[in-house]
Image (spheres, helix red, strand yellow):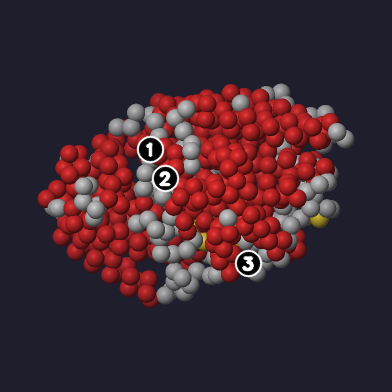
Amino acid sequence: MPIESVSKTGVESVRWDLSDLYPDIGDPVIDQTLSRLRGEAGRFKTAYYGRLARLDAPELSNAIREWEAILSEIYKLGQYAMLRYAVDTRDDRIKAFEMKIREAEARLENELVFFDLELGRLAANHLEELLASPALRPYAYFLRRRIETAKYQLSEPEETLINLKNLTGASAFKNLYEEYTTAWQFEFELDGKSQTLSGEELRALRQHADPDVRQRAMNQFLGQYRENQLVITHAFINVIKDYNIEREKRGYPSPISVQNIQNDLSDQVVATLHEVTTASYPLVQRYYRLKAKLLKRPELTLADIYAPLPQATKKYAWEEAQALVLEAFGGFDPEIRQMAQALFDEQRVDAPVLPGKRGGAFCSSSVPELRPYVMLNYLGRLRDVSTLAHELGHAIHSLLSRGQPLLNFHAILPLAETASVFSEMILTDYILKRETDPLVRQSLLTAKLEEIFATSHRQNLFSRFEQHIHAALSERRMSAKEMCGSYQQELSLMFGQAVKIPEEYAWEWAAIPHMVEMPFYVYAYNFANLLVMSLYQQYKEQGPGFAPKFKQLLSLGSSASPTDIAAVAGADISQPQFWQKSFDLIEALIRELEALVESE
């Protein structure tokens, strides 16, 4: 979608105000803060290096709070640099600033790395004695986890070296990938005119009404990755090789176990998640056969899977999208609506599509005392309204966990998508309950099912692909052709005969930044999506009485294990039957859509 059409949504002036952090990258306070933090980190190391095992509970509590105070300042600096860079990846001044902050962060973290290492070396029985003190109880889960994961830590010199080498190693390749791909511009003929589009705008044409436009757009978009395969493949391979060299050095048993252990999930739970999701691929195929009928096409290609239904071309102006989301939130819980409204009022949302702006959407939270920021690329589609609800859900999660100390503030990854996906469900249910036109209901159901498949099954596909290429690259070098072949196999498994796979889609893996930025992150989306569908079923059964339990779940941050936090709202993630209930809900949505089609 061309940039000039975005202004019709009224989103062009929706820019965030980062003055809560700093007024500008040239603010002298930034350099003053860096200088002060270097001194504080040095004094902290002098005070506590080699002494943690001798501290009593109040002394250790004070040390942790001092550590948190320094980390808070580092996180705020890092957040500011990241937010400035996210909306303008082309500005050399901002790029230099972002690199300067990342280098400063690495050096400060190297000064402090001893503390985390020494916490992990505390004797388990000694820690349990210390945890009897109220002073340390807020940190109980964090400290126990540090001891549990300490066996994967290296020596202090090694950890320091890793932090420094990453600046020109894995981190450099990740930055190269992001800067290189976000700088691409595409000349594309649309409505008889040649237009210059960003990658985000070109991908948005998957939802264009004309199948020729959809196919040409994706052929050109994915073709750019094929044409630049030397750079892209080297970036992927070097990040993955680096990841596995470090993984083996640390003693993790498998590539995915790094993320599983960080997520405090057993390999078996995650394997079960992959197995039940893969076994449910026939639901994906059943849906897309139905969508082919709705579109009156003999077959669909992957360029068509997000195609709009004929009656689903409505655009949502920014004010309309904002009102829809707030009303839906208010129907669930008035406090949650107020929290979301405040983010708009305080200009903590950046929404327009702009040249050089990072694609996609995110919510950024750094420390409990700072309210979060939301970045979007809003194009006025129903999918964009859902994305708004999704990212605001992340923000609500952050706001509800503000009572936690910094070390417990950020949700553990398997639960990090809980509030966001739940917010999407609230929005969809809100619209469906008020819509009587069967054709519009069809559009809403297709949109929801496609969001589910994108968030669960598509992420499962990515994660399976990651497992294969990480295992292969741990043994040998893979060619780009082999990586494309592996990805094509996963596409065929998911879509079966229901969707034709164009040749250029073999390169789709190269356009998935999560695989470079954080390997195996993607299964967390699937975990959260299936978890939320089960929780949403409970909400429908329990009514308003469910909201307090859900807010309590969100308020816990990462102060307990995912299993224990989920149990607060009545979810037992250790049982395979729990996951199956989520697929039952998906099938119910498909049946509802099938009934609407049959009634025409």
Q: Is residue 130 above or below residue 111?
A: above
**Residue at the (58%, 30%) spot, across then down:** 581
- The residue that disc 2 covers is 412
Please tell me whether mark 1 sits on a helix, a strand or a loop.
loop
411 to the left or right of 344: left
- The residue that disc 3 covers is 14
- The residue that disc 1 covers is 264
Are the residues at dot 2 and dot 1 in contact (C-beta closer than 8 Å)? Answer: yes
Q: What amino acid is labelled 3 in the image?
A: Val
Q: Nearer the viewer, residue 298 or 482?
A: 298
Query: Crowding near pointer 1: few (<14 within 10 Å), some, many (20+)?
Result: some
Query: Crowding near pointer 3: few (<14 within 10 Å), some, many (20+)?
Result: some
Q: Position of residue 55 (x, y in %)?
A: 14, 53
Please tell me whether mark 2 sits on a helix, a strand or a loop.
loop
Q: Is residue 456 above or below residue 160?
A: above
Q: Is residue 576 above or below residue 535?
A: above
**Residue at the (27%, 42%) spot, across then down:** 144
**Residue at the (58%, 49%) spot, across then down:** 544
Q: Position of residue 563 (x, y in %)?
A: 42, 37
Where the N terminus falls, by quadrant?
A: bottom right
